[in-house]
Image (cartoon, grey):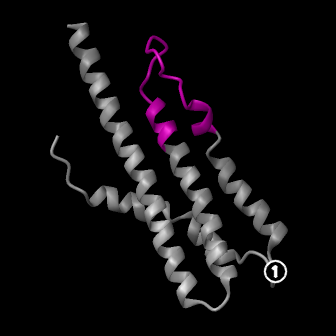
């Protein structure tokens, strides 16, 4: 009986890992798409680069969030249950890093605040996209 539950547990972990990677790849896709639109619409490249900087940190945050969620529900007896817990616990460091670097390099020739913050939350678009997908499993 225990072997049956272990098999189901591994199967669910594999499905979650697949969806976690899909979330990160969708975040990268939306980041590149919106960066391209901003690059073509605005005359200043600072807006597009600011957005992409925020989107890069948002992608790292979504990866850390996925690693954190993956460790929830694991026990000490599960092998590999703690893998990625360090990245998941440090996921807020990406948001703090965004504000620190924005504070340091903002201005006329540096990063622009609003596009960088909007870029960080691009992972929410990818999360919405994942939520709207239908899974038959």
Q: Residue at x 47, y 22 (%)?
A: 81
Query: Dividing the image into 4 quarters, which one contains the C terminus?
Result: top left
Q: Residues within 10 Å of mark 1 (few under 14, many from 20)?
A: few
Where does the image place residue 83, in percent across and percent down from the top left? 53, 26
Question: Which part of the image, by quadrant, shows the N terminus?
Answer: top left
Report x, y in % for residue 122: 50, 65
The residue lying toward the viewer, choosing from 45 and 57, is 45
> The magenta stretch spans which residues?
66-89
- Rendered image quadrant of residue 12: top left
Relative side of 101 to 80, left or right: right
Q: Name the spot of residue 17 as percent of width and height, x first.
A: 38, 37
Instruction: Name the residue located 65 percent from the left edge and 65 percent from the top edge.
Output: 53
In this rendering, the answer to whether 126 lies above or below 45 is above
Q: Is residue 127 left or right of residue 12?
A: right
Q: Is residue 78 magenta?
A: yes
The residue at the far right in this view is 104
Q: Which residue is located at x 81 percent, y 85 percent?
A: 108
**Would you place residue 100 above or below residue 106 in this image?**
above
Q: Could you say whether the residue bearing mark 1 is in a helix, strand or loop? A: loop
**Mark 1 = which residue?**
107
Q: Residue furthest left?
A: 136
């Amino acid at each position: 009986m225990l072997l049956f539950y272990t098999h189901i547990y591994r199967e669910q972990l594999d499905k979650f890992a697949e969806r976690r990677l899909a979330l990160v790849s969708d975040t990268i896709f939306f980041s590149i798409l919106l960066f391209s639109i901003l690059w073509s619409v605005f005359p200043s490249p600072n807006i597009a680069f600011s957005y992409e900087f925020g989107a890069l940190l948002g992608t790292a945050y979504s990866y850390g969030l996925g690693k954190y969620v993956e460790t929830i529900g694991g026990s000490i007896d599960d092998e590999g249950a703690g893998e990625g817990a360090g990245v998941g616990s440090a996921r807020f460091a990406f948001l703090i890093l965004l504000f620190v670097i924005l504070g340091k390099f903002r201005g006329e020739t540096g990063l622009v605040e609003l596009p960088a913050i909007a870029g960080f939350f691009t992972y929410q678009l990818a999360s919405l996209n994942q939520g709207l997908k239908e899974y038959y499993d």
